[in-house]
Image: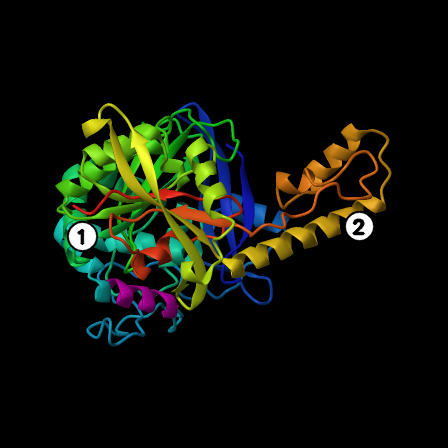
């Protein structure tokens, strides 16, 4: 098995040296690494405390031109079992001291970011919820693993070396690659503890009533993930994916709940299941705020039949939506339609919206729809659009295109602002624009409220938008 040296720049500027080798695992070629230490300012390798190089590793380092320092790497290498770590945050871990130091008599560790994160976790009640659901030992490992991701945003196998560089108030145990894999596998299989955590966390948040729900997907080549399935890939990657559905508390801006879903399940199909899970966890009075990805006729009907309160974006593709915009757009900027939202002027118009379906009582339900216009955002978006168009026209004027196809290809490659830019150019010369930004009022958005005659300003702050297309939204009447 051939070994080789890997030189890797870390987030905080340190250069880490590892010895790596390739192996075959579950029919796939994988890379395994062992950290040797970090480079000192003079370019020499400072070994992990207690690490002894093999003759092969010495040869590989020499071939790379890396000399080895006599001084061990400060803060690297775990202390011997039973010894105390060097600590620097008395208010977080006052009982721990500098009782035992490495043989060279000194040690350096970072405390700033971990101290802040641990304090935030304690103040928010996150630590107590983790302890109650998973036990203190596993909770400590979960917290440390999470802090590593926040601090470094690096691959999990680097958590072990990070752990040796920072101050942690709780000993999470050795966070090597194998331990992290087992930890995450066990948490994924422990439905009971996860349910207990979410229940405790929701109670700690005060059972929030206004929830924002969104779903994202992650492509993967892993073969062991059961939820990895083929589905609509937002990034255009030809890989199976898993979906992650996340619920946020709108008022406190904190995550409430998350769950993974098979990659083949579209966003709209997961809503009813997520709602049922939230009710099982103790939330019985809440409303959803959803983007257009969740919009479908069946979803709206299901939400109404389930008695849910919701606000959802609706694409401007249906006749009813277009008629709504055509009706209200000319007079939208009247002072009678103005609101102040978070210090910004916004215009809004309310209109009745009919959802017809035989599954609903009486065959239909009248909902409230709101159309909003944010002039400040509209002006900014118009300015950005026109600036991009002028920039593209200037670039195109310096080029020669023999056919419309070659011109269109160049536009597609250059138009970072999106396909709406490329449609604004004429072929083949591309020296003049054939279309200019609309002169009518700028970007609009639509939304809905309950059956009240007026819409509370607090609801408007969520529903208002300045997106380029009209964004209707729905809400059932208050029960």
Q: Is residue 56 above or below residue 243?
A: below
Q: Nearer the viewer, residue 438 or 314?
A: 438
Pinpoint residue 15: horizontal percent, then vertical percent.
54, 58
Instruction: Give SS at disc 1.
Output: helix
| Tag 1–tag 2 contact (CB < 8 Å) | no
- Who's the residue at 28% across and 70% down the image? 100
- Who's the residue at 57% across and 50% down the image? 61
Residue under label 2: 394
Instruction: Give SS at disc 2.
Output: helix
Q: Is residue 118 magenta?
A: yes
Q: Which residues are magenta?
A: 110-121
- Quadrant in which residue 346 is drawn: bottom left
Of the numbered discs 1 and 2, the one sitting upstream in the chain is 1
What secondary structure predominates along the stretch shown in magenta? Answer: helix
Pinpoint residue 309: horizontal percent, then vertical percent.
23, 44
Residue under label 1: 202
Q: Please, which colouring scheme is shown? A: rainbow
- Who's the residue at 30% across and 49% down the image? 449
């Amino acid at each position: 098995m051939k070994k080789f040296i890997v030189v890797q720049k870390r987030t905080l500027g340190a250069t880490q040296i590892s010895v790596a080798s390739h192996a075959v695992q579950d029919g796939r070629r994988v890379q395994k690494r062992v950290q040797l230490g970090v480079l000192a300012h003079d370019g020499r390798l400072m070994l992990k405390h207690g690490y002894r190089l093999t003759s092969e590793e010495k040869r590989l380092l020499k071939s790379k031109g890396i000399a080895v320092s006599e001084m061990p790497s400060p803060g690297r290498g775990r202390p011997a079992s039973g010894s105390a770590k060097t600590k620097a945050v008395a208010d977080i871990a006052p009982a721990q001291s500098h009782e035992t130091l490495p043989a060279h008599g000194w040690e350096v560790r970072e405390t700033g970011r971990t101290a802040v994160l641990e304090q935030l976790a304690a103040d928010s009640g996150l630590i107590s919820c983790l302890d109650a659901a998973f036990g203190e030992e596993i909770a400590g490992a979960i917290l440390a693993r999470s802090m590593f991701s926040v601090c470094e945003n690096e691959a999990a196998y680097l958590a072990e070396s990070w752990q040796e560089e920072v101050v942690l108030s709780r000993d999470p145990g050795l966070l090597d690659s194998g331990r992290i894999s087992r930890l995450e596998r066990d948490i994924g299989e422990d439905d009971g503890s996860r349910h207990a955590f979410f229940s405790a966390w929701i109670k700690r948040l005060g059972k929030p009533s206004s929830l924002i729900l969104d779903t994202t997907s992650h492509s993967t080549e892993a073969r062991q993930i059961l939820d990895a399935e083929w589905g609509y890939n937002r990034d255009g990657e030809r890989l199976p994916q898993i979906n992650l559905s996340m619920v946020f508390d709108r008022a406190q801006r904190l995550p409430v709940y998350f769950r993974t879903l098979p990659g083949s399940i579209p966003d709209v199909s997961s809503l009813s299941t997520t709602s049922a899970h939230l009710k099982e966890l103790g939330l019985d009075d809440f409303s959803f705020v959803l983007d257009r990805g969740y919009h479908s006729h069946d979803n709206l009907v299901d939400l109404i039949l389930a008695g849910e309160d919701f606000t959802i974006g609706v694409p401007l593709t249906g006749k009813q939506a277009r008629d709504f915009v055509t009706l209200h757009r000319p007079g939208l900027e009247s002072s009678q339609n103005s609101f102040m939202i978070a210090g910004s002027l916004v215009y809004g118009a309310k209109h009745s919206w009919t959802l017809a379906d035989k599954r609903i009582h009486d065959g239909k339900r009248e909902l409230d729809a709101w159309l909003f216009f944010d002039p400040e955002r509209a002006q900014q978006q118009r300015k950005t659009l026109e600036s991009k168009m002028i920039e593209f026209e200037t670039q195109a004027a310096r080029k020669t295109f023999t056919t419309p196809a070659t011109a269109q290809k160049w536009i597609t490659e250059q138009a970072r602002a999106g396909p709406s830019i490329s449609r604004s150019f004429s072929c083949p010369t591309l020296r003049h624009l054939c279309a200019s930004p609309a002169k009518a009022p700028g970007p609009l958005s639509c939304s809905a409220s309950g059956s009240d005659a007026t819409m509370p300003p607090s609801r408007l702050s969520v529903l208002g938008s300045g997106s380029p297309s009209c964004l209707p939204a729905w809400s059932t009447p208050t029960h």
